[in-house]
Amino acid sequence: MNKQTRLVQVRTKILKQNDVASRRLRTRFRDAGVCVVSLVSSPGSGKTAFLEKTLSQLSQRYKVAALVGDLATENDAVRLGRSGVPVRQITTGTVCHLEAEMVNDALADWDLQQLDFLFIENVGNLVCPATYDLGEMLRVVLFSVTEGEDKPQKYPTIFHTADLAAITKMDLAEVVEYDLAAAQASVQAVRPGMECLQVSAKTDQGFPQWLERLERLQQQSDGSAEIDSSTPGIPSR
């Protein structure tokens, strides 16, 4: 058996273990009636600013909490804590993504029945998180106007496993001469029919539509929506 074969076997085993753990998490979330949303992006996309704004606005009407993953530091958890909602940091060390067991451990002493929404901010990475299901009901992939219009075509796997795309930092679009039509075409080339929001945490652009999307999703989190746990990150519609 060569080294490559052993690596494939190890990776397959890890992914299988994660799928088992994510199914348990999904059942736990469904039984608690909590709507779980995960956010994935590359570093610097504005994901934390987007989540901070979301927590601040959503917590005015709902009970909300968040988990945030990073290789090191608790900086993002401290920042998100300014919204006034419960936030817990998951420090992954050398691991470039969150896994279902990490999420499960972080939630060990939380009463999920007391929550309407739980947000999971993944480690900044568009590669590794794509194949790790976290039991979420909605996976959102973000990319900013400062990253270029072809991000979806460069990282197609993460867009295939996400349910919604959001283009962030739209307040900078004119400054960087961003071609919005090209970016939307890039999304559609990879994932035809995918919903794509344009948002700005600075100006609130797109947030009414985003919050409306979350409210519709929350109505499904009572267990009435069928979940296909065989495909990471993609609830069946």
Image (tube, grey):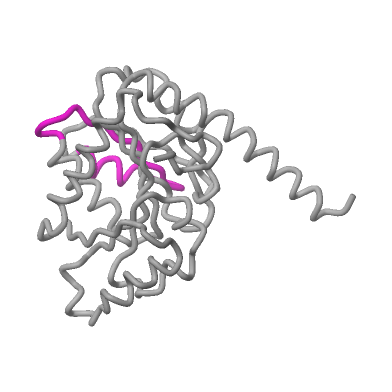
On the picture, is 208 further left or further right than 21?
left
Residue 218 at what x, y percent from top left?
Answer: 25, 32
**Residue 219, horizontal then vertical, whole percent:** 24, 30
Magenta stretch contains residue 210: no
Identify whether 1 is placed above or below 196. above
Residue extending farthest to the right is: 1
Of residues 77 and 1, which is closer to you in this image?
A: 1
User: Is 181 placed left or right of 203 in the picture?
Assistant: right
Decide which of 90, 1 is in the foreground and name it: 1
Magenta segment includes 75? yes
Left or right of 39, for residue 16: right
- Left or right: where 49 falls relative to 25: left
Picture quadrant of residue 90: top left
Q: Residue at x 22, y 31 (%)?
A: 64
Q: Up-down: is 229 above or below 44?
A: above
- Quadrant of the rendering where the C terminus is positioned: top left
Q: Position of residue 214 (x, y in %)?
A: 23, 40
Q: Is residue 202 above or below residue 62?
A: below
Across and down, in percent, residue 143 comes to 34, 63
The residue drawn where x is 20% and y is 32% is 85
Give the residue drawn at x 38%, y 25%: 29
Q: Indicate the quadrant where residue 144 lies.
A: bottom left
Q: Which span is picked out in magenta? A: 59-81
